[in-house]
Image (cartoon, rainbow, N blue to C red):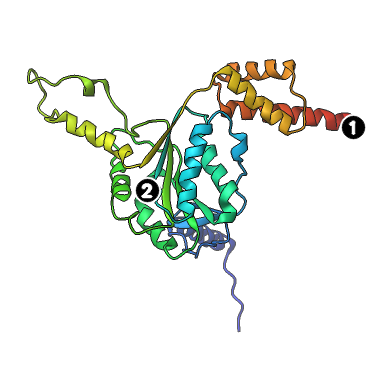
Amino acid sequence: MAHFELPDDVIQTLSTVLQQLHQTLPAVHQQPDFNAPAFKWQDQQLKAIYAPKKVYLDDLLGIETQKQKIIQNTLQFLEGLPANDLLLTGSRGTGKSSVVRALLTQYADHGLRLIEIERDDLSDLPLIQKIIENRSEKFIVYCDDLAFNAEDENYRSLKSVLDGSLQSGSSNFIIYATSNRRHLLPEFMHENTPVTKVDVPQYTELHPQEAIEEKISLSDRFGLWLSFYPMNQVLYVEIVEHYIKKAGLTFNDEVRAESLRWCQLRGQRSGRAAYQFSKHWIGAQLLAQKLSDNK
């Protein structure tokens, strides 16, 4: 039998076509590996995260009241008792996301699991529930930086899920979300201005207060709201000191001064800025020590 080989240019063309087809075809659905402690909802699948970043509740200072309420709600959920969907709002870098991730570190051995989902995928929540409905683990479905613009209609999907039948029959599924906005949707100055019938454009909302109520009602669907506030300089320095000492290094006036310069340059005094400075300082000190030891 004669041996036939395709020309190199034909092989290259076929390879390019196959790559393009691979990019356009939907991903092959695989069964999730529930041995993982966390998941990312992507391409309508639960993608396992085997080594999520460790965040510890004891490292989150200045938010004791919020932590206590979050922990209580989560423990009720883990015990199969009534618990609320949770909305964490407030200033950036104040620990909203960290406290949710710290729950996984604290309670993964108690059966807690975390599913991260993007805002645009919230309409898939019923599908997620179907996938996990027979699991014994308890799943927090977590949406970070949840917010909608004025034209975005996706918020209606979240409203129906939070207020509909999804939660009523599920004991292993709860929603935690963080947002910089209390009401999740933008609010405008004209919405607080009384409407008159003089020179009203043709397509002006006849009952604007009802539209405003609809915006506010989205956050009302979350049973528990917790607010996080900007921190003062004393707390910022306290957080820096905590991380420096945890690493076994000395906290002194030099470290304090450098940490304050760091937050001034970044224009942000927050737990996130304190943690980032601590990583910078600890890394620099350990590197200097390592180079000194190698001489």
The residue lying at 73 percent from left, 15 percent from top is 253
Q: Nearer the viewer, residue 33 or 173?
A: 173
- The x, y position of residue 170, in whole percent, is 38, 58
- The x, y position of residue 10, in whole percent, is 53, 62
- The x, y position of residue 261, in whole percent, is 64, 16
For label 1, the SS is: helix
The numbered mark, 1 or 2, whose residue comes first in the sequence reads 2
Q: Is residue 216 left or right of residue 130?
A: left
Q: Is residue 254 left or right of residue 292?
A: left
Inspect the image, locate mark 2, and give the three-letter code of the amino acid beneath it. Answer: Leu
Vertically, is 48 above or below 242?
below
Specify the quadrant of the image occupied by residue 60. Answer: top right
- The x, y position of residue 266, in whole percent, is 57, 20
Instruction: State the mark number for residue 293.
Output: 1
Q: Nearer the viewer, residue 32 or 74?
A: 74
Pick out the residue farthest to the right.
Answer: 295
Q: Label 1 to label 2, Cα distance in Å?
A: 53 Å
Q: Is residue 232 left or right of residue 163?
A: right
Label 1 crowd (10 A; few <14 / some 14-19 / many >=20) = few
Q: Nearer the viewer, residue 23 or 288?
A: 288
> Residue tagged by mark 2?
122
The residue lying at 50 percent from left, 33 percent from top is 65
Pick out the residue farthest to the bottom.
Answer: 1
Vertically, is 177 above or below 199?
below
The residue lying at 45 percent from left, 51 percent from top is 77
